């Protein structure tokens, strides 16, 4: 054996404990044997295995029970708060004179929002009122002319009767030779002239009656010309009233800084916006597969990220008769061979009770939960189970 190799030999119990095989004087002790731990670890693993075996069916039963009894609430987060909002404008053009509200101010129905310069409209109203008077005077003059024409016709009728008698008399005298031919011709001419004058006066009377709408004795307030003048006056008054713009409903005005006194606003130009504050609703867009048991009138719970822990309650007000994509500018065309089925979303409107709760503002994102009152049930569970097994 090599010299640098040392063999450690277990000492003989009869020898001194200080003696070592290598001849050194250091004390050497044999290592004490460890106690076996395999039985303890085996028992723990066996107990854990049985616990897992027991938990597995419990978990399956609990999961199946949750699936069968669940699904009663249809929830979606594709929902937003909506409110009545309108761009405040007027149908007359003019220069802004006064602004009676400030940004984000709460206004009641009928509150004055802004005014236009009303001088041109007041002048137009005065002209329209004057026109009504002028039309009334003209109609009264026509009625007077009608009465005068009637008198002239009566006189012309008397003249016709007189010249007719004179013509007959001259005709008799001419036949007996007592009158000259000239006298007879004069009498005949006078009769013809009187008859033509009577016919002309009757034509003039008919024209005056037509100008009086065929009812010369009726009130002028029912004449079309008078009614037209009154309508123009009322239109001028309406335009004057519309120079003062009022709130159509209760709400909050916004974007008021878009106008200022002195700015010209064309007709129907939006000055700023008014958003209703006392009536809001929720527009949700659930998937078509989630609307199986959703019906109008079902209770709804609404939560908003802005107010954690606060719930609003309402009901399903209506469900759209068509999917949202049906109203898009360019609806999807499924005529190609690469068609892919896409789950559509159906708009749904939810009426919300906002009394004694924080205010909801238009555009807020919300989560909607509809209590359909219909759980999935055991048949649905079996269908889902077998469907998953077939897919696998």
Image (spheres, rainbow, N blue to C red):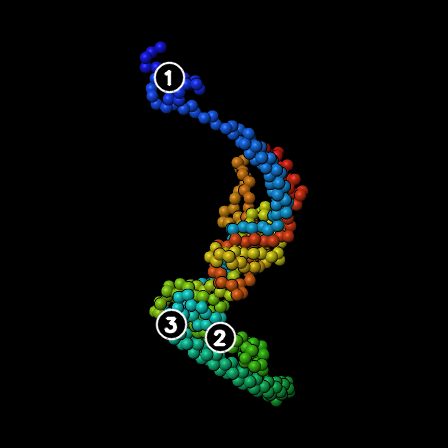
Q: Which residue is mark 1?
A: 21
Q: CA distance from mark 3 to mark 1?
A: 117 Å
Q: CA distance from mark 3 to mark 2?
A: 25 Å
Q: Is residue 329 visible?
A: yes
Q: Residue at x 61, y 86 (%)?
A: 161
Q: Is residue 253 above or below residue 141?
A: above
To which quarter of the image does residue 200 belong? bottom right
Q: CA distance from mark 2 to mark 1?
A: 133 Å
- Between discs 2 and 1, the one toward the N terminus: 1
Q: Which residue is mark 3?
A: 98
SS assignment at label 2: helix
Q: Are marks 3 and 1 in contact (CB under 8 Å)?
A: no
Q: Position of residue 87 (x, y in %)?
A: 45, 63
Q: Is residue 83 above or below residue 288?
A: below
**Which one is in front, 278 or 333?**
278
Q: Residue at x 50, y 47 (%)?
A: 330
Q: Which residue is mark 2?
A: 234
SS assignment at label 1: loop
Q: Residue at x 40, y 24 (%)?
A: 29
């Amino acid at each position: 054996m090599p010299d640098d190799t040392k063999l450690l030999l277990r000492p003989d119990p009869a020898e001194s404990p200080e003696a070592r095989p290598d001849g050194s004087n250091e004390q050497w002790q044999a290592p004490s044997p460890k106690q076996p731990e395999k039985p303890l670890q085996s028992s723990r693993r066996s107990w854990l295995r049985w616990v897992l075996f027991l938990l597995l069916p419990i978990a399956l039963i609990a999961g199946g029970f949750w699936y069968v009894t669940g699904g009663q609430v249809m929830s979606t987060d594709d929902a937003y708060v909506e409110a009545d909002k309108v761009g405040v404008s007027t149908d007359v053009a003019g220069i802004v004179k006064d602004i009676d509200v400030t940004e984000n101010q709460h206004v009641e129905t009928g509150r004055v929002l802004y005014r236009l310069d009303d001088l041109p409209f007041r002048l137009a109203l005065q002209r329209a009122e004057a026109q009504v008077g002028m039309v009334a005077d003209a109609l009264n003059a026509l009625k007077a002319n009608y009465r005068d024409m009637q008198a002239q016709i009566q006189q012309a009728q008397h003249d016709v009767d007189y010249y007719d008698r004179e013509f007959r008399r001259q005709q008799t005298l001419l036949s007996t030779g007592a009158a000259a031919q000239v006298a007879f011709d004069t009498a005949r001419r006078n009769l013809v002239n009187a008859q033509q004058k009577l016919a002309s006066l009757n034509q003039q009377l008919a024209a005056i009656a037509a100008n009086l709408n065929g009812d010369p004795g009726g009130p002028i307030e029912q004449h079309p010309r008078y009614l037209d003048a009154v309508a123009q006056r009322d239109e001028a008054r309406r335009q004057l009233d519309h120079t003062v713009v009022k709130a159509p409903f209760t709400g909050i005005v916004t974007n008021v800084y878009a106008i200022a006194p002195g700015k010209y606003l064309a007709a129907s130009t939006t000055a700023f916006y008014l958003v209703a504050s006392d009536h809001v609703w929720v527009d949700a867009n659930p998937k078509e597969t989630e609307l199986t048991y959703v019906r109008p009138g079902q209770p709804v719970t609404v939560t908003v990220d802005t107010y954690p822990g606060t719930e609003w309650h309402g009901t399903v007000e209506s469900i759209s008769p068509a999917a949202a994509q049906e109203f898009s500018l360019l609806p999807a065309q499924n005529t190609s061979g690469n068609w892919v089925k896409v789950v559509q979303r159906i708009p749904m409107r939810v009426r919300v009770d906002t009394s004694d709760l924080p205010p909801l503002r238009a555009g807020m994102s919300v989560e909607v939960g509809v209590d359909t009152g219909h759980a999935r049930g055991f048949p649905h569970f079996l269908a889902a189970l077998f469907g998953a097994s077939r897919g696998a």
